[in-house]
Image (cartoon, rainbow, N blue to C red):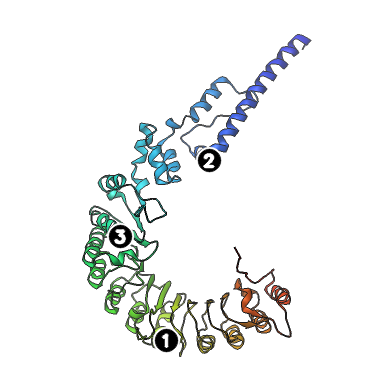
Amino acid sequence: MDIGEYSATAGASLYWFRVSRNLESFFRMKRNNFSVVNKIVQSSPAVKQPKLGFCSSLKQTQVSTVVLDWGSLPHHVVLRIFQYLPLIDRARASSVCRRWNEVFHIPDLWRKFEFELNQSATSYFRSTHPDLIQQIIKKHAVHLQYVSFKVDSSTESAEAACDILSQLVNCSIQTLGLISTAKPSFMNVSKAHFVSALTVVFVNSKSLSSIKIEDTPVDDPSLKILVANNSDTLRLLKMSSCPHVSSDGILCVADHCQGLKELALNYYILSDELLLALSSETHVNLEHLRIDVVSENPGQIEFHPIKKHSWDALIKHSPGVNVVMYFFLYEEEFEPFFKEETPVTHLYFGRSVSKAILGQIGLNCPRLIELVVCANGLQPLDNELICIAEHCKNLTALGLSECEVSCSAFVEFVRLCGRRLTQLSIMEEVLIPDDNYSLDEVHTEVSKYLGRVWFPDVMPIW
């Protein structure tokens, strides 16, 4: 090759090198701005990917430009993009072009939807626009499968949710959730209005598998309608703080919904008959049972004991069930609890609990996995904690606040539990220094037994 030919070749190579570098910079910029889109495009068999070699042709450059023409992307690619967008952005994107508007109405995009309803003057989150709600009811109600309603503290928002529910006559909902973000506003709606609206969904869906209707005026007759239409599909039911439901109402659900795996309810409707129904041979293994034990005023509710043989029947039938109990009681109301062996796995005390009760827990809760005590008073819990460590061999998590434990007893507790304690949240003021350990020394000793660095929690000072 002579000098002239070499110069011409070198010049051409330099030119294409610059073109390639420019293209690479261009695509790098696009990747930074649309990384999610590019991942989808690259994984899509319907879109041919351009090859950016050292000497890319102009034709390949044109193909690259076509790939980045968002209006010509295949429907399934735009659908994936829309699924990452909040509703308001999705609605705005639908007005870009006809193809995107078509994707906006694809049924797959409307299977899951959360209605946000609030009074703008009193709420911090954005409300679903009324026009969009009507569009969903007219065009997409038949596609809805996973539906939730998030309402603020106003009665108007809860009533608006009921109005929407009453219009879902052509739906096939599988999961339904009613969520109050502040106080339970559904309780302010008239019982007749709420039950009528809920019944529409219960009757028309026929395939409900998950229902969360806590803090609502649902009643026994509406539960019977639920059972009559969805007994074969119901798997999860959360209905704590539903004062119009009786023990007979929830027993009806357990008797007929043999596939029920998760249940949340208040203690006042828990009964021996319910536990035995959940333990029948035809019932599937229960996976999660949450029980809220709540009292607003001492003596207002008389708490009945549950017999040991009923608990035993449940554990024999469902040995892996998590029994979670939340206590919001006053000390004098704990008398019926933990006198006999109780198969609870997770215990949370939101109010003060006595030393005597904690001692009974150590002796009668062998399945305990997690214990949280938010308040106890000024009596040290040394012996009680050590008893729990010795007898609750499955304990992996402990949280303590507004109570007292000597540093020596706490170190002994951790030594007995060892590395099985995966979660240990102890407020610094809980630990009382003694002759054996200061607060600094506790940190070192506890870290040694846990096999990881540990410090007590400190209340931030703002």
Quadrant including the C terminus: bottom right
Residue behind mark 2: 39
Q: Which quadrant holds residue 407? A: bottom right
Residue behind mark 3: 158
Q: Give the spatial CA distance, label 3 vs label 2.
A: 41 Å
* 429 in relation to 28, above or below: below
Q: Secondary structure at mark 1?
A: helix
The 10 Å Cα crowd at callout 3, few under 14, some 14 to 19, many 20 or more, is many
Residue behind mark 1: 333
The amino acid type of the residue labelled 3 equals Ala
Left or right of 302, for residue 5: right
* 366 in relation to 122, above or below: below
The image shows residue 365 at horizontal and vertical percentages of 50, 84
Q: Secondary structure at mark 3?
A: helix
Q: Secondary structure at mark 2?
A: helix
Q: Earlier in the sequence, mark 1 or mark 2?
A: 2
The amino acid type of the residue labelled 1 equals Glu
Q: Which quadrant holds residue 26? A: top right
Single out the residue that lies furthest toward the right. Answer: 3
Residue 2 visible in the shown view: no
Quadrant including the N terminus: top right
Q: Which quadrant holds residue 188? A: bottom left
The image shows residue 426 at horizontal and vertical percentages of 61, 74
The amino acid type of the residue labelled 2 equals Lys
Query: Looking at the image, which residue is at 57% across and 38% down?
Result: 32
Q: Give the spatial CA distance, label 1 vs label 3.
A: 34 Å
Query: Looking at the image, which residue is at 27% across and 47% down?
Result: 134
* 177 in relation to 14, above or below: below
